[in-house]
Amino acid sequence: MKRDQTKMKFSFKLTRFLVLMTALAGLSAVLFLASHPVEALRSAMPLQDEPTQTPIPTQAPTPVSTRQVNPHIGSDCLDCHGNPNMVGQALNGEQVSLYVQPADHQGSFHSRSSGGCTTFCHEAQLSFSHANSTMDSCTVCHWQRGSVQTNTGILVFKLPYQDVRAIALEANISCKKCHSEIFETTTDSAHTRIMQEGNRYAPVCSDCHSGHDISIVTRDQVSAVCKKCHLAEYTTYKGSVHGAALEANSNPDVPTCANCHGSHLVSGPTTSNFREQSVKICGDCHSNKSIMDKYGISTDVLTTYMDDVHGLTDWFRKTSLENITRATCFDCHGKHNILSPDNPASKVYPENLQSTCGQCHKDTNIRFPQSWLSHRRVTLKENAGLSIVNTVFIVIVVVVTLVIVTFILLDVLRRARVRRATRKLAIKDKVEAKATVKEEVEEKDEAK
Amino acid sequence: MSDPVKLAQSHPVNAQPVASRLREREVKTLQRRFMTMKDGSLAILRFSPLLRLLHGLTLVAITGLAFTGLAQIFHNNFLGQLMLRLLGGLNSTQVIHHLFATLLVVPVAFHVLDMLETLFVRRQAPGMLPDWQDLKDASDTIALDLGLGHNLPRFKRYSFEQKSVYWLVALGVLLQGLTGLVKLFPIQVTELLPGISIPYAGILHRWNAILIMIVVFIWHLYQVHVRQRNLSIITGRMSLGEMNANHPLELASMLEKAARLGVEVPAGFRQAVVEPLPVAPMIIPKKVIKPIMKHEHSKKNSSTDTSDKESGEAK
């Protein structure tokens, strides 16, 4: 009977446990869903399919046959555009050289792979001024019927564009035909955004890669390309540890503009997205031992930052649960003006720390910056006092835990022994009681 | 009537001398502590409503602090992250942590005031003060557990285990409060102290928190809920049997005090006080155990109190 009861008790307990666990699981699922709206879950997944790669055409498309209309088409473009005197004039009076250096174009990758100027890039030019040239343009050369001017004066051609910039903007679209993937990437960049906001001088493909001498922008060329517009930033960068090393001996270890800001997908430095990425941007090189060992720079900077009060929010960046209001690398070390901490002009030079910390910690005082451990780990070598206190406290915790566990174990064991002894005794009592009852019965029988 | 002393004495409350008022209050408190339940069983009021309230507040505050604190310590861990997510992020977790800390200030302040009142108004020694007897009790317990000794320790109002938990937590909470304030107001603190004090406070706060959690959630819970189902801190009562087993000296001192003050005590209380067993049950030979166990059984059957098995075994 007792065994049945214990069994029943056990099964009842099991059922209760299972019901409780199911309820708990349900509750936690509800809480989880409440804290993750479905949109957030969806956003964690890849947003779109992999962009399909458009095949680069191997053969030139059949050119539009305009030979009958325009005798110029059969001739090489450079027959005319190889003349340095050719100048185009937009409708607003702006002038631009129409001269193409033959060497420029022949050195470009495009001259070798494509059928010619009009195949990919200058398709539009086929149709307008060359096919249906205005009288104004013809008379620049053909000032007399049947003859061509051969003088060396400047030849000004009227162009059907509002201004010179419109030419670049129109030609830019032709890049998309072959480089659609990269072109799509640029549409998310900060440059395209300001273009959409109305700045027609925001850079397009040809501004960085140039028009005819099209080439990949190398590490050494990057800063020269960016400085065309961002001169102030470039000047500051040139004075920083990174910029100086790049300028001096094109050091392969230091970051150029593109290493931090990206190339085609340039993102604005004021966006929260850039802030989120910044720790990774700096950390990628600064936690790399093979690079940092050359300059004797600690590779613990990232881990020590992450463990500290400022870096604690890092994992939230992935979930974007909250705004990153805490300091990232560039808040203390500067943006383009990053200098060695030993340099008195550096933002993190000990004497400048008070003002640097004061950017966020208002009313700071001279002692406050010492509370930041300057990326030093809590080890005996780097922070002896803290390390000793830490170790002593760990020892205390371990000792106290051991004492508690010992007390509990001894107590449990003693109780188990007492319980066993009690149970044995109870069984013996029962047996004896039965025996006495039997004896009594026997005695009674005998008496009868 | 301009004399303030006379004015004070004229008030009906102040007319009575302080000593006699205190005595009256003591008598009332003592009378209240000898309880006869509805079913006729006898119990002792072990904790006053104030102490129970303080314990409840401390329980809520420390549990809340532990959860929000652990989530911050283990922010790299999956569970820590889940916890932080459920609490709405790091910033809100910290706000909740500070709210619980503020809640903990209430029981601490009340407790300190209560202590001061006990010391300076009632002129009684607080039961939590450790003494040499606690060391003896501890060594007796270890000897008993190891089977080396024969003395079953008999406790006063608080056993050495309860005292050790109390002092570890009390001092720990004070240290937590101090280091927490240092962490919360670093700029104000560095007006007085060197900047390095902030990382020191951080390390102390973290490890001390873990120490408190181990003491509270392992030792304290084992003592109260695993070893026996002692709910006296919630109900306030402890049955006479349990009282006899766990705090016989307090019961004895209460009865003695009742006799001294002339407080009437129901007869059951005096009958219940039995002579302590000379030795612990597990060490006694079986032949000796039998009569003792029988004695226990008969006592259980005769008395109406519902003391559990544990208390019987502990004797």
Image: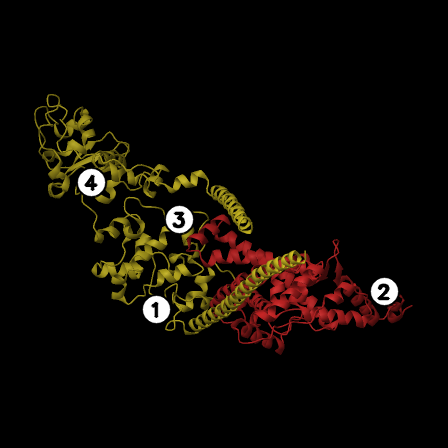
Chain colours: A yellow, B red
Chain for mark 2?
Answer: B
Q: Nearer the viewer, residue B164 or B116?
A: B164
Q: Residue at label 1?
A: A342
Q: Is residue A296 left or right of residue A353?
A: left
Q: Nearer the viewer, residue A389 or A403?
A: A403
- Please, what is the three-letter code of the amino acid marked with disc 3? Lys
In this rendering, the answer to whether A168 lies above or below A270 is above
The 10 Å Cα crowd at callout 3, few under 14, some 14 to 19, many 20 or more, is few
Find the residue positioned furthest to the top.
A68
- The tag earlier along the polypeptide, 3 or 1, is 3
User: Which secondary structure, mark 4?
Assistant: loop
Chain for mark 1?
Answer: A
User: Which secondary structure, mark 3?
Assistant: helix
Q: Nearer the viewer, residue B240 or A149?
A: B240
- Please, what is the three-letter code of the amino acid marked with disc 1? Asp
- Residue at 54 percent across and 54 percent down: it is B95
Classify residue A115 by image quadrant: top left
Residue A222 in picture, x, y percent from top left: 24, 51
Q: Residue at label 3?
A: A318
- Please, what is the three-letter code of the amino acid marked with disc 4? Gly
Q: How far is the residue under mark 4 from the one under mark 3?
A: 40 Å
Residue B189 in picture, x, y percent from top left: 54, 67
Q: Residue at label 2?
A: B13
Residue A211: which disc? 4
- Confirm whether residue B109 shows in the render: no
- The tag earlier along the polypeptide, 4 or 3, is 4
Q: How far is the residue under mark 2 from the one under mark 4?
A: 102 Å
Chain for mark 4?
Answer: A
Q: Are marks 2 and 4 on the same chain?
A: no
